[in-house]
Image (spheres, helix red, strand yellow):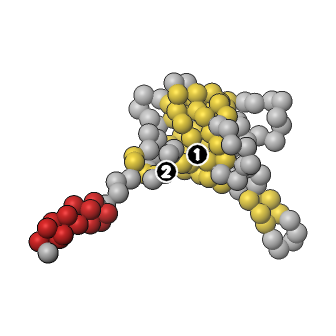
Amino acid sequence: MFLISFWFFPIFTGICQKNELKKSPIIGTWIEKSKKSDTLIFLSVYDGQNPIFLLKRGFDPIDKKNKVPKSLSGPYWYKLEGNRILIKWFLSSDANFHSYYFWLSENKMKLKLCDFFNDNRSQKDTLTFIKEK
């Protein structure tokens, strides 16, 4: 009996250990500087393969009483690679990450990002976001 309980103890304690969440490389809420209509929220921790940010773009009316989130709003997976950010929208059927220009200031209070969510696909501006305090 002692041998059996000794054997199962490491397995049982291994199952019950807490899983540590990974820390994201960028955290906080970031507001687009010029129009102040778009917001990025970088989540502080994640438990999947890649960190996550939320893009909030406001709402579009569908009739007099109802609104829906603007196109491409919602959660994104991301990876940082030098001056590039690779992103993938949760709701996309495309399995690939897409690469865009990205810059983060040394004090981590300002970032620049290619306007990947602009409806005009031929014109991609660089937007500046300021971290909310």
Query: Residue placed farthest to the top in the image?
Result: 82
> What residue is pinned by disc 2?
48
Residue 96 vs residue 13: left or right? right
What residue is at 88 percent from the left and 69 percent from the top?
A: 63
* Left or right of 119, for residue 108: left
> Residue 91 at x, y = what percent?
70, 53
Q: Is residue 58 above or below residue 51?
A: below
Disc 2 to disc 1, C-alpha distance: 9 Å
Q: Residue tagged by mark 1? A: 77
Q: Pick whichever of labels 2 and 1 is earlier in the sequence.
A: 2
Residue at 83%, 37% (x, y): give it: 120
Residue 105, position as x, y percentages in the image: 47, 29
Q: Amino acid at mark 1?
A: Trp
Q: Is residue 94 visible to the viewer in this orientation of the structure? A: yes
- The mark total stands at 2
Label 1, secondary structure: give it: strand
Q: Is residue 93 left or right of residue 38?
A: right
| Labels 2 and 1 touching (C-beta < 8 A) | yes
